Amino acid sequence: MTDRPTVLLPVRILEGEPIPEGIPDLLMRAHVVLLGYHVVPEQTATGQARMQFEARARTRLETFEGMLADAGATVETRLVFTHEAQATIDRTIYEHDCLAVLVPNATNPPETVLVALRGRVGLDRTATLVGGLFGDADIDITLYHALEADESEADARAMFEAIVDRFVEAGIRRDAIDVRLAEGGDPRAAVTETAEAFDVVVVGESDPSVVTYLFGMRAPQVAESFLGPVLVVQRERPADARSTE
Amino acid sequence: MTAEHEPKRGTGTNIEGEAPEPEPEGVSDAVTVTEESELERTIGLVGGLTIGIGTMIGAGIFVFPGLAAGNAGPAGALSFAIGGVIALLVALPASELATAMPRSGGGYFFVSRSMGTGPGAVVGLGLWLGLVFASAFYLVGLGHYAAAVFTELGVVLAIRPVIPLGLLFGLALTGLSIAGTENTAVIQNVVVVGLLVVLTVFLSYGTLDSLGVFGRQTVPEAFFPRGYLPVLTTAALVFTSYLGFAQVATVAGDIKRPSRNLPLAMVGSVIVVTIFYVATIFVATSALGAAQLGTLGETAMVEVAREFLGLPGAVAILFAGLLATFSSANASILSASRTVYALSRDALLPRRASRINLSYGTPHVALLAAGGPILVLVASGRVEVLAEVASFLHLIMYSLIAVAVIVLRRRDPTWYEPSYRMPGVPVLPAAGALASVLLIAFMQRASIAIGFVVIAVGYAWYRYYADDVDLRGDF
């Protein structure tokens, strides 16, 4: 798993949610942490669900593992019974130091990728991820940035030159990179609107509400807004971030 | 912080040929690791404390003060203090064992692993039924509060509504726990914190007023109006108010950072409720006098609040009492269901008893195994007997938990590595075991008889059903 970016793929393992079309191809250059999880209500002990469903969950997980491996990814699997999906996903991100989490929606073979940036926050990790996944492929990358209130267009352009250099370092061809700036407004709405034209969207985790928003809370709206898969780049976890409670 | 165990399974099979599930490979702060999968731990310290406190205050504050004052006079406060000391003497060994074995099933798990299947089965089946008796007791209390609402509204009913209301709530609770999948832990936390705030305000005001700060003349009376013996019989009666800390251990498999949070949640919740109970009896007897309190029965606290704060106070305590008894009953039904799971995992009950319902994801058989008998017991309406049998069955477990610590410290098996070690072994656990057994002696004859029958049936079931199963912890 030397140069492969580590991507977490969380799957609700028992609820008829197969790996959507196009996802194995999208992740062919990744090291995938395939997290199969099953959420049980509080009345149920997690061990109770394990006794009954572990064998079936394992079988499904292995099928998915095979699909990803066939496409070229390296895969590690985790199977977790939990009361809180978010706690499990967060823990797995931390334990595997995942660069990004994939919200899996179906896609065509990816040709265009939108990378939403918020300044330089998490830039290195975003560049490493995009470079690792799409570096040597024939894919158009669009870097997108919504101007903030106190930011001039000239400032943003200057910032972008440095950013583009960083992506080139990470292995993306300079001529595959397009830069797009948008005027103020609600940045999230702007990203949502722009995203429609692309196959894959990469966003940063810096805005936690985006993460919650993407994770199944309001699935119908998400499905309408982002028809394709979304990679959420994760902040670097501090080494001793564990045991916060 | 990973306790590594050899993943062995208990040996032998029950008469249906089911063997105990293998032990997990290890336990970390966030997860229990088994061979093929992981079990996430999701309850933090606050959640653990609210499980303990939420289960306990429903009884001690909202049901018992009138009964305790009627039996023992103002010395009822002493009865609660005695109960608190005994609970603490058991919470300490339970904490030590929980950090060495942070698995669902609590006291049953500790006893079966340290002393073998026979005592384990008796304690496990006793714990399940003890929780059933406790839930029935809370539901009758809830029925009293719901009936008091009708009285407050001036509605006159043709029949005494306590039992029918208790049954109704029992049905609703069982149904909700089978079909409801909302996140009730959050609600439980809010309810418990809200109750503690209301009670702190009320008791602070009441204490100051009772001490004469606002010019009140307290009712003068003897501290021991009926002598010393009623203090002990009352202690035995109200011990039901201290059963909740063991519920924390029943969900030990869900607690994050178990080595830190389990001891804090168990010992902390016992200390918190003891302070609240003693203050409550002091305030209540100061306000109305023990003799009058004794005539007011289960909802005496409503009248105490009316005495201090008028109608708004009465309404607030009425509402708080409904919430508190409801949350106690709810927590006990869920714990009973967890206990059934722990027993079936170890092949002491049929595996199908912990089957999960495919549409709701809840263990409907285990929940019905709690809800069904609860309704029968509620129909009996015998508050004091229900409370004492619940305490009896828990006290047997508590004494064995205390003994287990002594046994394990002496035998010192390699797998026994508690991260919290209680002080004063063997004196303190021996005192806890002895006090638990002695308290039983002060109960009503009927309660003691029922308790022994349950234990005998439990032991007979083990010999019939799972005689071959060996669970002693060599994992």
Image (cartoon, helix red, strand yellow):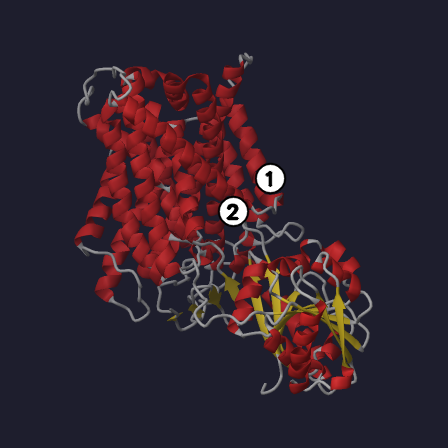
Of residues B14 and B433, the one drawn nearer to the viewer in this rendering: B433
Compared to residue B92, the image places residue B293 above or below, namely above
- On what subunit does the disc labeled 1 rest? B
Residue B384 position within the rendered picture, expressed as x and y whole percent measured from the top left: 36, 28
**To which quarter of the image does residue B7 belong?**
bottom left
Q: Secondary structure at mark 1?
A: helix
Task: Give the class, few, some or many, for how many residues have Cα within 10 Å of label 2's Cα (few <14, many ≥20).
Answer: some
Which numbered disc, 1 or 2, marks the residue that appears first in the sequence?
1
Q: Nearer the viewer, mark 1 or mark 2?
A: 2
Q: Label 2, on which residue?
A: B185
In the rendered structure, the answer to whether residue A195 lies left or right of residue B117 reads right
Of residues B9 and B419, the one drawn nearer to the viewer in this rendering: B419
- On what subunit does the disc labeled 2 rest? B
Please give the name of the residue rendered at 53% of the width and 39% of the height, measured from the top-left corner. B371
Three-letter amino acid code at the position of disc 1: Gly
Residues behind callouts 1 and 2 on a single chain: yes
In the rendered structure, the answer to whether residue B145 lies left or right of residue A33 reads left
Q: Label 1, on which residue?
A: B175
Task: Give the class, few, some or many, for how many residues have Cα within 10 Å of label 1's Cα (few <14, many ≥20).
Answer: some
Please give the name of the residue rendered at 55% of the width and 37% of the height, measured from the top-left corner. B173
Please give the name of the residue rendered at 26% of the width and 57% of the height, measured from the top-left corner. B405
